[in-house]
Image (spheres, grey):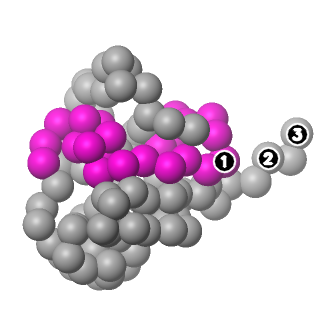
């Protein structure tokens, strides 16, 4: 699934705050099990430019430690990174949720 370029991404205020809260909310609302987003798509979702470290360090995307805010936001939504191409600026995400129905 490609992120619709015309989609409004601001989701309003929530209890989950921070720079990447809109990414967490967008993923939680995503009906797809997998999604491929380029960095520009992600920047539209969060309403801000990704930091340079996200383009340099793979660990930034996987979360679980301080300073990996994008990865932590992805994990908080119940998703994980299954592919990352820093050179082309794309990330492949997969939901950890199973559909039993």
The mark closer to the camera, 1 or 2, is 1
Q: Is residue 13 magenta?
A: no
Element assignment for label 2: loop
For mark 2, does the 10 Å Cα neighbourhood hold few (<14), some (14 to 19), or many (20 or more) residues?
few
Residue at image coords 75%, 54%: 98
Rate crowding at label 1 as few (under 14), some (14 to 19) or many (20 or more) other CA atoms within 10 Å: some
Side (left or right) of 71 relative to 66: right
- Badge 1 or badge 3: first in the primary sequence: 1
Looking at the image, residue 52 lies above or below residue 26: below
Magenta stretch holds residue 48? yes
Relative depth, front residue between 63 and 16: 63
Checking the image for residue 33, the label placed there is 1
Rendered view: 44 above or below 54: above
Tell me where the magenta segment starts and ends, as one range.
27-49
Closer to us: mark 1 or mark 3?
Answer: 1
Q: Which residue carries the number 3 mark?
A: 101
Which residue is under mark 2? 99
């Amino acid at each position: 699934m490609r992120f619709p370029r015309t989609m409004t991404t601001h989701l309003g205020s929530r209890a989950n705050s921070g720079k990447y809260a809109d990414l967490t909310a967008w993923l939680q609302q995503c009906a797809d099990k997998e999604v491929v987003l380029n960095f520009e798509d992600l920047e539209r979702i969060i309403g801000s430019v990704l930091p340079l470290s996200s383009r340099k360090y793979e660990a930034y995307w996987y979360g679980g430690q301080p300073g990996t805010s994008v990865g932590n936001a992805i994990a908080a939504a119940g998703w994980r990174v299954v592919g990352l191409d820093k050179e082309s600026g794309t990330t492949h995400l997969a939901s950890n949720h199973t559909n039993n129905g």
